[in-house]
Amino acid sequence: MAPDMREVDAVIQRRLTSDVAMINQIAHYIIGAGGKRIRPMLVLLFSSALGFSGRERYELAATVEFIHTATLLHDDVVDESALRRGRQTANARFGNAASVLVGDFVYSRAFQMMVSVNSMRVLEVLADATNVIAEGEVLQLMNMHDPDLPVDDYLRVIRFKTAKLFEASARLGAVLADSAPELEESSAAYGRSLGTAFQLVDDLLDYEGATAQLGKNVGDDLREGKPTLPLLLAMERGTAAQRDVIRHAIQHGEVARLSEIVQIVRDTGALEATRAAARAEADKASRCLDLLRPSAHRVALLELCVRSVERSS
């Protein structure tokens, strides 16, 4: 996918341009940090797997990356994060106000790009996705510091906040190819399950990885009071004393006993159980590809399922 991704990067650089110097500086800073670019890759892989090779795929691949980037700029302000992708967050470097406003610029630029494709269906898919993502952000905010959060409510946040843009990216590939409804739905289902698996692994890496590998500070989720699956499972499986330690940390966003909590999460098997849940979602995603004709792009989508789960960063 390297040549196609270079085309997407060229669109990103061109579309980021603004006459306002600070917008250029911050937007290029956050985009220049890199990232896995999985969402734009899904647009490209599905459109190619389904027989579409028009240049609109590059525009829409860049569009979903812009939507993702805007959410990161806003997320980091809400979470008071200081590190992302191994560098200072934009809010830590440029301030909260500038990050929020440039996030607004990147969002609105994404909508300009959607319109340029001249497809009402594309607009419908991405407008729906951005609305659901915003709902997910608010749901997550409501769930902060709640150690009694049901697992189903936690998974709902993942599906809204993370998996929805994966779903939309995969669906866009099918929309561009003017695929039959069942192919569009199976593509979207793949993205939804892959996105869920991806976020589950992100959440477990907060207790398994190291800061240098993750590109963010280990324990950030706990500091923010996020009751993620590793913690919820550790409380469910642990002793009363272990449960109390984790409950207190979630309620108060306390990381003073982080090493002890990491040990509890490991000892209770919560990390393995979380990765198993991610693997189950990835397996579900791979089964959604049964309707696709054999191709190198289909193989890449299958490989992406494995890589998303068996990663350490």
Image (cartoon, rainbow, N blue to C red):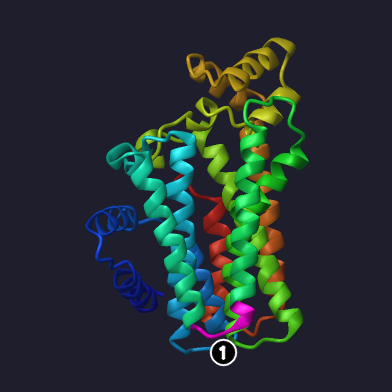
Query: Measured along the vertical axis of the image, is residue 153 above or below residue 306?
Result: above
Dot 1: few (<14), some (14–19), or many (≥20) neighbours within 10 Å? some
Q: Quadrant of residue 173?
A: bottom right
> Which one is in front, 212 or 160?
160
Q: Is residue 210 visible?
A: yes
Q: Quadrant of residue 239?
A: top right
Q: Is residue 295 visible?
A: no
- Residue 310 lies, in percent from the top left, at 54, 50
- Residue 32 lies, in percent from the top left, at 29, 57
Circle 1 residue: 51
> How many numbered circles does the render carry?
1
As for residue 287 lying within the magenta part, the answer is no
Instruction: Please give the name of the residue rendered at 48% of the width and 58% of the height, measured from the top-left corner.
Output: 68
> Which one is in front, 130 or 302?
130
As for residue 121 lying within the magenta part, the answer is yes
Residue type, label 1: Gly
- Residue 174 lies, in percent from the top left, at 62, 80
Query: Measured along the vertical axis of the image, is residue 247 above or below residue 9?
Result: above
Instruction: Please give the name of the residue rendered at 61% of the width and 36% of the height, measured from the top-left corner.
Output: 141
Which stretch did the figure color magenta?
Answer: 117-122
**Along the horizontal axis of the image, is 1 left or right of 90?**
right
Instruction: Please give the name of the residue rendered at 36% of the width and 74% of the height, measured from the top-left corner.
Output: 2
Query: Measured along the vertical axis of the image, is residue 298 above or below residue 190?
Result: below
